[in-house]
Amino acid sequence: MDTHALHHYPPNAEIARWIVVAFVAGAASVLLLHQGALALLYAAHLAARAPYSLAPTAPFGIPQIWSLAFWGGVWGVVLAEFLRRLDGARLLGAALVFGAILPTLVAWFVVAPMKGQPMAGGFAPKAMAVALIVNAAWGLGTGIGLYLFGRRH
């Protein structure tokens, strides 16, 4: 019996590759797609915050862009675990939806209150839409990275 045929997702030998690519793709997607989408929205006067912020974050004073990239990598690993059985267009579509929903909800209802900020951008529709769009862009970018580099083709 061909044991390779039993694997629908990366075999154990490729799990490390899948996780490393997920982290790198998630971090890179913050720098390229998340912040790129934010730049477009900011230029159109739809986003209140400028992209690529170097403002220090608490408690260590790390520039915001590098903090975002690190957490984008962590979220990339989470996304990869949830979507490890998907490939192709299904992976990309699910990554886009995952990005729009899960990180956004955590940012709105966990991170914002911890930082003393209003939940869900104060429930302002424009701020909420910006969060959904930039995180969906991140998810799509992370999915593209996983699709291109996560598995041997």
Image (cartoon, helix red, strand yellow):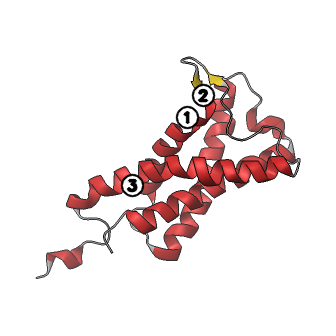
Q: Quadrant of the N terminus?
A: bottom left
Q: Quadrant of the C terminus?
A: bottom left
In percent of width and height, residue 20 lies at: 35, 50
- Where on the picture, by quarter, is residue 121? top right
In percent of width and height, residue 104 lies at: 65, 45
First along the sequence among labels 1 and 3: 3
Tag 1 residue: 66
Residue shown at 78% from the left, 46% from the top: 128
Q: Residue furthest bottom?
A: 1
Q: Are marks 2 and 1 in contact (CB under 8 Å)?
A: yes
Tag 2 residue: 63
In percent of width and height, residue 77 lies at: 43, 49
Q: Which mark is residue 21?
A: 3
Q: Residues within 10 Å of mark 3 (few under 14, many from 20)?
A: many
Q: Is residue 52 above or below residue 82?
A: above
- Mark 1 residue element: helix
In percent of width and height, residue 14 lies at: 26, 60
First along the sequence among labels 3 and 2: 3
> What residue type is disc 2 on?
Pro
- Mark 3 residue element: helix
Q: Nearer the viewer, mark 1 or mark 3?
A: 1
